Amino acid sequence: MRQLLSTISLVALLQSFFFSVYAQIPTSSTVSFAAIEQVVAANLMNNYPDGNFYPERFISRAELASTLVKAFQLDKRQAATQENVISVPDVPTSHWGYKDIQTVLKTGIMKGYRDNMFFPNQRVTRAEAFAIFAQAYGVFQFPDNTVEEILSTYPDAVAIPTWAKRAMATAVNEGFVNLDYQGNIKPSQPMTRGDMAYALSKYLQRQQQPASVENLRQQSN
């Protein structure tokens, strides 16, 4: 009887563990626990001090900058090595993301707003985040008709801002964009940590297939 109770308790404990893990993963998009594990293992994103990833939490502009610098080694690009300092009134040198923000500004991967403000704590939409991600990755120079053809298969593509369409075409063509169960991109929704983990996991997979990526780049030129 004691052995039976112990087995039941163990099963209940395991069920509770898996429920708590998957409860952290958004149910509206295809972000797997494996993708999150892969990105954390590659040190492109980190868990919080309590050990949880919290994929549902929104990403700020500062967090986006820091993540992209890590993923694409932007600090090694020639523009990033320039000694000039870009004035950013709302990002003092004491800010935790100061160096990375300087890097994305110098390389042109991200831009400031009026009066050179960066708004480091501001959320970014999925359209903004995926467009910036594609810019760091290398936007394919698809002609306009190809851009429209690529995006036409997504029900809510009409909601993508005009300025983001070419970059979004690259992002979805490379498989970086997680969709909901109806195949929607949801460009106006805030970017979450889970969304970013999905994109980064797909990027890591692309890194393991350099030949196929090169072929795609050649086809787009």
Image (cartoon, rainbow, N blue to C red):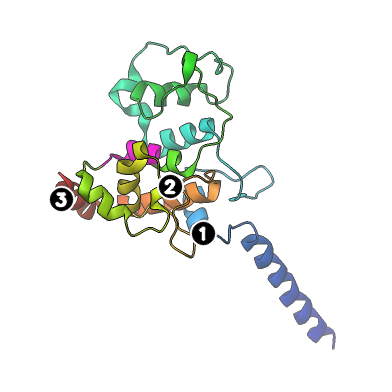
Residue at the location (75% across, 74% down)? 12
- Is residue 130 positioned above or below 113 on the image? below
Q: Label 2 amino acid?
A: Ala
* Residue 181 is one of the magenta-drawn residues: no
In primary-sequence order, the first of circles 2 and 3 is 2
Q: Label 1 amino acid?
A: Ser
Provide the residue span drawn in magenta. Answer: 131-139
- Residue at the disc numbered 2: 159
Can residue 208 be seen here? The reply is: no
Mark 1 neighbour class, 10 Å CA radius: few under 14, some 14 to 19, many 20 or more: many
Closer mark to the observer between disc 2 and disc 1 = 2
- Residue at the disc numbered 3: 219
Q: Label 3 amino acid?
A: Gln
Question: Which secondary structure dominates the residues rendered in magenta?
Answer: helix
- Residue at the disc numbered 1: 29
In primary-sequence order, the first of circles 2 and 1 is 1
